[in-house]
Amino acid sequence: MEGDEIMEDTKVKVNIDDKLYLNTYNVDTLSHLAIKDQKICENCKEKTCTFICPARVYECKDGYVTVGYEGCLECGACRIACSHDNIDWNFPRGGFGIQFRLA
Amino acid sequence: MAEKFDVIVVGAGVAGLSAAYVMAKEGLNVIVIEKGKYPGSKNVMGGVLYRHMMEEIIPEFWKEAPLERPIVEQNFWLLGKESVAKTGYKGMEWSKPPYNNFTVFRGKFDQWFSKKCVEAGALIVNETVVKECIVENNKVVGVRTDRPDGDIYADVVVLADGVNSLLGKSLGFHKEWRKDQVALAVMEELKLPSDKIEERFNLDKGMGATIEMFGDGTLGMVGTAFIYTNKEHISIGCGALLSQMSERNVKPYELLEYIKQHPVIKPLIAGSEASEYYAHLIPEGGYNSIPKLVGDGVLVIGDAAQFVNGIHREGSNLGMTSGRFAAETIIHAKKQGKFNEQTLSHYQELLKESYVMKDLKKYKNASTTMEENPQFFNHYIPAANKVMSEMFTVDGVSKREKQKLAIKHMAGGKSILSMGMDGFKIWRAMK
């Protein structure tokens, strides 16, 4: 099974914005996430961050990875999943970022 | 002159608040630093809080704390593509005091718990991120926050900064977690009227049920999908090892949507409306991943210490107990006036003698065994579904023949010996 794209035949499609709109954020003007070196992303085959992030913060456009930090759920998965340790990951400044009401 | 406290607790989750409460009650000067707007605003849990360990902090808390439902029924499902083999237990002894466990919303519960800490004498400071520990002569003496003039000093710093524990990492207590040491979980709260929830889950008014799902709920990856009932919400989610999700190009939100559309699950949540969407890492590395827990002037508790028993979906209770042990250790150290690693290592003794370390040690190889043997999730769970279907389908085939077919499904081309080996492997990992 390893390496198989197991979601492929499930035909599930999700508009992530519909999910993120449910949440409350206090968005900072500064990003708490950054790509350390875009050159590494250019040569990265897996681009794990673009699919593993539950908020789809990372998108690859022409080899350049953009960071939509505004929707970040602050889980930390991208930082650990990036095989190149190429994500500078911090918590948003105090009081900023996601504000869960329930859970 | 920067402020000096007896103890700084970093993080107002259940571990940090447990530690703070016990120490404040004992008269120590405690400050809790929380990055969120309020305690609970960054905290995510499947939703099951264990009564026994919480009562060791605040007796009869259930009389006043904001809780969702006491759990009277716990189910374990082996999920197939369009089927499920079920087992579980329902017991009315759990429907009355003192109860076994409850679903809770951490957004509400942690705020209540932090108020209790304030009543006990602790200071809670929200909207403040601790950027680093202040270390002098290899001893942690305080923390540097993101506030102007934000240095705070204390005899001991308790790291309850959660699964990511950037502070533990920066102290060299652990390296960055490997992808197989954490599970990535996503979850939604789905709004549904309370009487509908009770009808669908066959519950008396106000009572709750849990369902843990193995197999197709994570598309065969090591992990679980789950459904928990709250008062007027259903928590539905799934989590699997980050290593397997990465290897298999799984978008977590697509997996969640797949579960919501699963033919066995869909009727349970029909007509509900999503209220909130969450993601969280769960420290699933177990015993072998526990970081350094004690240093001069510093202790690590809760998720930051990888205290999660993934096999039994326990975590908040280990957090509370470790928080209480840290508090008792610091109270003891305060009497001696010594806060070095040797004095604080009493914490490790307490952990070792308790269910925390005993349980984590028991399952120390479970996660690895399951990751290395995908057949447990990919073969045996679908096979169990086939066997049940075979045995319950009345089609004129003789029962002896059915029995043979059942064994054939279970073996799935494996020899009896290799099936026996698999049985042995799982027994050894769980014993």
Image: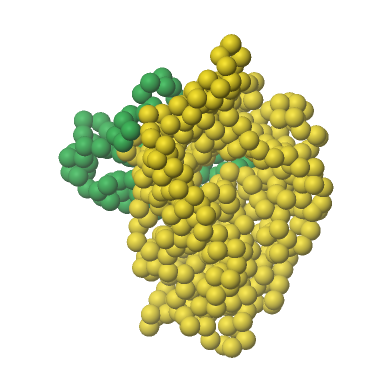
- The answer to which of B89 and B129 lies nearer the viewer is B89
Left-right relation of A23 to B373: right
Observer able to see residue B301: yes
- In the image, residue B96 above or below residue B409: below
Identified at 53% across, 20% down, the residue is B401
Identified at 67% across, 67% down, the residue is B21
Number of marks present in the image shown: 0
| The quarter of the displayed image where residue B376 is located | top left
Identified at 31% across, 48% down, the residue is A87
Where does residue B391 sit, x and y in percent of width and height?
58, 22
- By what rule are the colours in the image chosen? by chain
Left-right relation of B291 to B29: left
Where does residue B369 sit, x and y in percent of width and height?
41, 48
From the image, state the color of chain A.
Answer: green
Observer able to see residue B115: no
- The answer to which of B211 and A64 lies nearer the viewer is B211
Where does residue B16 sit, x and y in percent of width and height?
58, 63
Where does residue A80 sit, x and y in percent of width and height?
35, 49
- In the image, residue A34 above or below residue B207: below
- The answer to which of B75 and B134 lies nearer the viewer is B75
Chain depicted in yellow: B
| The quarter of the displayed image where residue B120 is located | bottom right
- In the image, residue B339 above or below residue B287: below
Identified at 50% across, 61% down, the residue is B361
